[in-house]
Image (spheres, coloured by chain):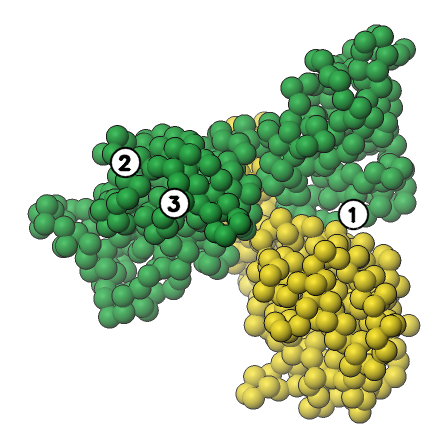
Amino acid sequence: MATEIRLENLRCQFGRLAAVDNISITFPASSVTCLLGPSGCGKTTLMRMLAGLQTPTSGDIYFGEQRVTDLSPSERNVGMVFQYPVVYRGTTLYRSVELPLIRDRHVSKSERKQRVESILDMLDLTPLAGRDVSSLDNATRQKAAVARAVARQPQIILFDEPITNVDVNAKSQLKRALKTLVKQHSQTIIYVTHDQTEAMTLADEIALMENGRIVQRGIPRELYNHPNTRFGGWFLGNPGMNFVAHDIQHSDGRAAVAAPLFAQPIRLNGSINLEHVIVGIRPEQVRLGVKTPTSVQGEIMRTAFVVGGQQLVTLKMGEVLLKAKTHATHVLTRGALIDVDCPLQAVTLFADNGERLDVTLKPDPVEQSL
Amino acid sequence: MTALEFRNVSKKLRHTVIARDMNLSIRDNSFSVIFGAPGSGKSTLLRLITGFEKPDKGEIFLHDQPVNRVSSAERNIGYVPQSFALYPHYSVFDNIAYPLRLMGMNKTDIVPVVEGAARRLQITHLLKKRPDQCSGGEKQRVAIARGIVKNTRIFILDDPLTGLDFKLRERLFDDLRQMKEELAATFIYTTSDPLETLILAEDIHVFDGGTIIESGDLASVYHQPQHVRTMALLGYPTTNLFAGKVTQRNGQNVCVTEIFTFPVEIYHAAHPDLDVQVALRPQHIRIDTTSSNGLIKTNADITLVEDLGGELHIYLEAGTIALETLMPHHDAAHVTEGHTTIGIVPSDFKLYAATDHRFIGQGVY
């Protein structure tokens, strides 16, 4: 049933702006790929080209072996779920899910019944089957839209921020439904969102977009733990990664970094001929009140409560500000000094242009005397 | 000194009661968040402060001066409305300059003030553009710049970050706090978002049902909410709440709920079979508790695990009760959907009276 999606040099230009800038990528069959990125990164334009709602400026789209670039939306056999659920007033939920199947002459009456009932059951919609769709709340309407798209059994389903406009309380319910669905169905799913939590929760793979390009693609934890770019480190995580510029000290052909995050020079593992690097570290990986040979002292500037009662602490080391997440019960006094330890294995290094460097920090006791 | 005070203020808008005999006192030079559910009337409250609306009853004071009869223009308040409300046919510069022109400031004096506000919000490069050439986040910065351009001691921000995506909001959090530290002024800020409140507020005023149900510095209100609505609203994920009954067993007060039974200490006179609401903050639910002693335990099913990056947000069902918990990722990497045992430290159960919703006691060993 399912089919892979292949893009070849796909480009969409609006005036001088390349909304989608020469993307070549294959989304594997039977997997969920989230197109993740901020407003304006081109994810919706890319989705619209897949659906046939937007003509590419150049490049090609293949579903399996079939080139679909010039096909109309109806010829592409894709299901779509939009940000705002489409509602047919005066139609029962059952009927609105059944409708696309009635139009399909290849589906027998008994099969139609079986498909509709099984999807309604999976999404816990059976008790509401007789209700008028327009009388349902937004989250349930959106579930109905999902049921309608899935019941047709298209090879590909496209989701365009289906959860964004659902109220907070219903969001988890809808996410749960989507998660059940993607586990049990084998369609190829492309899911567009700007919400990293949705992407991290639902995706087999995330394709992270910035300025019309896919800057990284991989399994969610891989993107979170090893961002390819400074943008990725910032975008995933809340708040995102800290970035602190460090001068590189070169001596005897060896390169090392020290202040402001490290009390003594730390050797770089790998060759490098730059003057400085950017040290990236996630707030939850900064350890507070832990004294090590490399820890430094920071002044506590501000504290705030964040998710789950943790404290988000803003620290000042010279001119540099660093954010750290710590336990709710950690007593922190504004203006006080505290030991700040950045574990070397938790650090990612970036070049000035924002690209990750293939260089790590080397814990090496010999270097203490450097 | 107080920057703002409401004394017994009542206000109806058509048939909706916005404020009912309401008292509110906002500390000078504080970042004060008026926190309440959507649709609770927060915007109207702010319009009473700016003078766009008049109270039906009661008196409003700004810096200890009664202002009921002072016009909106004379109150000299910086205001950032909820919708950007930018003039589409004006440049960004002219939008920011608008309040200064209204005050009658002359052209040559306006330029450096507008440029200063633009620099503060990093929108200098936008000054010549029109609002429709700006992104959503940029428009919001323009609206904030216009709100802070006046030299004044009170700034009012009406839910200014609503509708912006999370990463934009993250940047603006830092900008707003920075601004507060640089401008010696009072910031009065409304929102219905608990995380925004927790990140920005120095003082918090919980607005619910036409009145302030609880006020104070953020840490004490967050750690010891005296009203169940504060407990329910202030925190992310939202606090777990379920019904319970306090009864006496062998001379000891015990709280009985569908999923837990535990001894409690009641601070106020209790009567037999007291109906309570039991509150349990998400971070206080422990998962996989086989080795821990002294916990109140029950069986539960994990129905959804959401990955927030640094944390996992875990949804559970125990009996008919839905619970949420949150754990740092490094503590919970092994958690998956399915059957589990959860455990609670007894003192993490907080009890609120079902009648007046006030805090009355907590679990004990």
The residues bearing labels 1 and 3 have C-alpha atoms spaced at a distance of: 48 Å
Judge by depth and name the residue closer to the eye, A208 or B38: A208
Q: Position of residue A36 (x, y in %)?
A: 50, 42
Which image quarter: residue A89? bottom left
Q: Which numbered circle lies on residue A166?
A: none
Point out the tag, 2 or 3, that comes first from the N-terminus: 3
Label 1: which residue? A303
Query: Of the residues shown, which amino acid type is indicated by label 3?
Result: Pro
Residue type highlighted by circle 2:
Arg
Amino acid under label 1? Thr
Q: Chain of mark 3?
A: A
Chain (yellow):
B
Task: From the image, state the color of chain A.
Answer: green
Left or right, residue A117 beside residue A123: left
Q: Who's the residue at 59% across and 29% down the image? A: A228
Label 2 vs label 3: CA separation? 13 Å
Mark 3 neighbour class, 10 Å CA radius: few under 14, some 14 to 19, many 20 or more: many
Residue annotated with mark 3:
A56
Residue A297 lies left or right of residue B273; in this view the side is right
Say what secondary structure mark 1 lies in: strand
Of tags 1 and 3, the one toward the viewer is: 3
Tell me residue A332's x, y (percent).
83, 43
Instruction: Confirm whether residue B301 shows in the render.
Output: no
Q: Which mark is residue A67?
A: 2
> Which chain is indicated by disc 2?
A
C-alpha separation, residue under disc 1 versus residue under disc 2: 55 Å
